[in-house]
Image (spheres, helix red, strand yellow):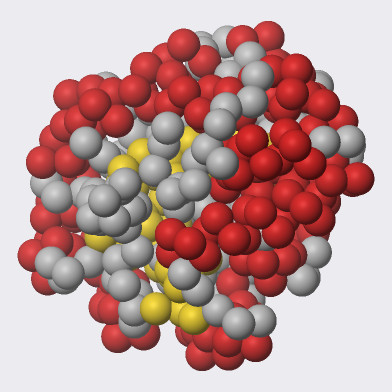
């Protein structure tokens, strides 16, 4: 199977059957994949690790996704919404700590109209023009995305979760469709956003064939960012008794994504660390190059609970950035004060 890994490493595509074979035998080939993925990342991004300041602005959501702890029908969720001044304060703190990307993330909260978001984006950009602004506010119209882009937002995260229609429908309410999710992603790409997609590993009803379809879709979409983390159940959802995703398979798939999309911005997610305290280091060592410490006010961090037992302290907290810097240095990597943009073929960032 090493020849299949070598094909990926040398920028050749794998077909569905070849990817399926790799995943079915991932335990046997993992170390070789990790080595090649790490080498691929180092060739493009060297030993630089980019940090993003995550600001969870609201846990209100109009949707009722079956896996999500902030789904609208969860009456046990303690709802909150940051004010504009609180958002700006988070940015002020983050900038002084050395963050040059702010990630504003929310449930699909109808409060955040285009007008309100445009104002927030412009104010952040005007104060910190050397910073990138990443948004994650779910599905919106192309016209809405265009307004946010014109206001100087740079990136948009929208995980597709499952490209397989039948599987997608088992995870989401009927009013949400993979067709619309795909359209949103292609709209974002066309507008010019650095676009992020991704999926959960081990979500209920997921098959290996589904994962292969997701990987092939990512290759087709060619996003600038990919977010992959293990599924973790939440006690107030229909999937509360479902098994969590496998960490080792998640790491393997992260490495495969690095080989499929060599220049991708690839985070070692909080979900990884929630299941394995050493997973962040492991993620960096197998090809990840982004970490997103939490800049949200400490009073709300335990309220943005997409899954059970989410980490919101220690290395996940922005105020402990020095500890994170030291940890990355201990494994041979360097946290840089940089926007950390996607690098095109000619190494010119966008």
Q: Is residue 205 above or below residue 196?
A: above
11 vs 224, left or right, is right
131 vs 324, left or right, is left
Residue at 19% over, 40% down: 148
Residue at 58% over, 19% down: 163
**Residue 79 placement (x, y as % from top left):** 51, 50
User: In this orientation, does residue 87 appear?
Assistant: no
**Residue 52 placement (x, y as % from top left):** 41, 65
**Residue 312 placement (x, y as % from top left):** 62, 69
User: In this orientation, does residue 26 appear?
Assistant: yes
**Which residue occupies the foreground of this view, 217 or 123?**
217
The number of numbered discs placed on residues in the rendered structure image is 0
Q: Is residue 350 above or below residue 62?
A: below
Q: Is residue 92 above or below residue 118?
A: below
Residue at 77% over, 71% down: 278
> Which quadrant of the structure image shows residue 114?
top left
228 vs 238, left or right, is left
**Which residue occupies the foreground of this view, 174 or 319?**
319
**Which residue occupies the foreground of this view, 336 or 202?**
336
Specify the quadrant that holds the N terminus. top right
**Residue 119 placement (x, y as % from top left):** 13, 51
Residue at 68% over, 9% down: 166
240 vs 45, left or right, is right
């Amino acid at each position: 199977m090493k020849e299949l890994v070598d094909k990926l490493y040398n920028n050749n595509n794998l077909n569905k059957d070849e990817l399926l074979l790799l995943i079915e035998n991932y335990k046997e080939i993992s170390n070789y994949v990790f080595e090649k993925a790490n080498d691929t990342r180092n060739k493009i991004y060297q030993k630089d690790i980019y940090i993003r300041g995550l600001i969870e602005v609201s846990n209100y959501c109009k949707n009722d996704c079956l896996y999500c702890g902030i789904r609208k029908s969860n009456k046990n969720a303690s709802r909150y919404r940051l004010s504009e001044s609180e958002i700006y304060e988070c940015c002020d703190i983050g900038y002084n700590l050395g963050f040059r990307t702010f990630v504003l993330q929310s449930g699909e909260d109808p409060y955040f109209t285009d007008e309100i978001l445009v104002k927030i984006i412009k104010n952040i950009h005007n104060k910190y023009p050397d910073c990138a602004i990443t948004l994650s506010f779910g599905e919106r119209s192309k016209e809405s995305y265009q307004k946010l882009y014109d206001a100087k937002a740079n990136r948009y995260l929208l995980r597709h979760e499952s490209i397989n229609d039948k599987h997608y429908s088992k995870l989401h309410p009927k009013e949400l469709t993979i067709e619309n999710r795909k359209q949103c992603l292609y709209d974002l790409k066309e507008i010019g956003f650095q676009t992020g997609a991704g999926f959960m590993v081990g979500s209920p009803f997921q098959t290996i064939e589904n994962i292969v379809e997701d990987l092939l879709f990512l290759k087709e979409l060619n996003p600038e960012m990919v977010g992959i983390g293990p599924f973790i159940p939440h006690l107030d959802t229909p999937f509360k008794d479902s098994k969590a995703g496998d960490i080792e398979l998640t790491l393997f798939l992260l490495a495969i994504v690095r080989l499929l999309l060599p220049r991708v911005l690839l985070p070692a997610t909080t979900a990884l660390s929630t299941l394995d305290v050493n997973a962040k280091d492991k993620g960096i060592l197998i090809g990840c190059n982004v970490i997103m410490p939490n800049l949200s006010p400490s009073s709300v961090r335990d309220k943005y609970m997409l899954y059970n037992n989410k980490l919101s302290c220690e290395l996940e907290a922005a105020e402990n950035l020095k500890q994170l810097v030291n940890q990355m240095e201990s494994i041979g990597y360097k946290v840089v004060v940089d926007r950390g943009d996607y690098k095109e073929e000619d190494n010119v960032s966008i």
